[in-house]
Image (cartoon, rainbow, N blue to C red):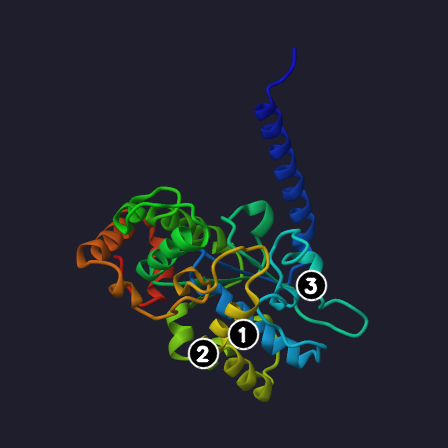
Amino acid sequence: MQMAPEFVKNIYRRVRRMRNLMLLEQAAPSVDAFLVSYPKSGRTWLRYLLSCYFAQVAHLDFEPDLRTTFRVLPNFDRDAERGLPVFVGRSDKISLPLIAVSHRQFTAQLFAGHPVIILVRDPRDVCVSAYFHETKHKHRFSGSIAEFIEDDTYGIPAIVRYHNGWATGIERSRSLVISYEDMSSNTDATVRQILEFLGQPVDEAALAKAIEQARFSKMQKTEKKTGIPGHDYDRSDEDSLRVRKGKVGGFSDTLSEAEAERIIEICRDTMGPEAKTLMHRSGIALD
């Protein structure tokens, strides 16, 4: 009896996923800290800023851009352009902390017991940014913003599940919670917190230069010029960019009052107390 082609493909997909999970589980002990966030929470900015800083203090032979930033802070995966294989920080001449970056849901087998930096952002801003990402960048959603808010795969229910999982998952891990809002209002202080958490001394000159290199306008120009590896999109359309607006409270430019309140309502009703505490860092109260 011959198996259906789609059935065979699904088996191969499951086998690949299991193999990748095993490889990541083996790699996890070598990670010094994880940097995690839900997509569109400001991770690209923070990764780029930290990569600029560490490239200077380690005297790397390149200045990171949005293509090479992964060589300093790689994704927690096996991707040949953006993942753990491209990390340059472990050699006879270079020693950098391995900060593995991930959007993965919390799973104990990968993350339990490891130091974690978790980046949070107002879910209204995350939702709007995710909407443009899925409609303009990925082309995986074609409905209205109101429909997107309720969507179980991409909308607020997914944002809630992510933060509920991580908020309870890191209870027994050493962790640092930072917010996009704190980064925006006081970038210097936020990066100092991260460096202290990592046990890294602060190089004042390198920190000042990295903050300047990672200014929003400069990053946007860099993205338009180089793009991001693994992504094919129209870089002339600013709504399709990863570095799109970056405005704290920018959700009000897109959402109606009723839509913004609906997001808060869903979060209040479905976020656990631990996740609500995480969200306090972004300046919103959900109690």
Q: Mark 2: which secondary structure?
A: helix
Mark 1 closeness class: few <14, some 14–19, many ≥20 residues within 10 Å: many
Amino acid carrying mark 2 in the image? Thr
C-alpha gap between disc 3 and disc 2: 25 Å
Q: Earlier in the sequence, mark 3 or mark 2?
A: 3
C-alpha gap between disc 1 and disc 2: 10 Å
Relative to 3, is 217 above or below?
below
- The image position of residue 136, as x and y in percent, is 41, 54
- The image position of residue 19, as x and y in percent, is 67, 39
Q: Earlier in the sequence, mark 1 or mark 2?
A: 1
Q: Are marks 1 and 2 in contact (CB under 8 Å)?
A: yes
Mark 3 closeness class: few <14, some 14–19, many ≥20 residues within 10 Å: many
Which label was assigned to residue 229?
Answer: none
Disc 1 versus disc 2: nearer the observer: 1
Amino acid carrying mark 1 in the image? Leu
The residue under label 1 is 49
Question: In the picture provided, is 36 more to the left or to the right than 131?
Answer: right
Residue pictured at 62% horizontal, 73% vertical: 64
Which label was assigned to residue 87?
Answer: 3
- The image position of residue 113, as x and y in percent, is 58, 54
Q: Earlier in the sequence, mark 3 or mark 1?
A: 1
- The image position of residue 210, as x and y in percent, is 55, 80
Which quadrant holds residue 257? bottom left
The N terminus sits in image quarter: top right
Relative to 126, is 204 above or below?
below
The residue under label 2 is 187
Q: Are marks 3 and 2 in contact (CB under 8 Å)?
A: no
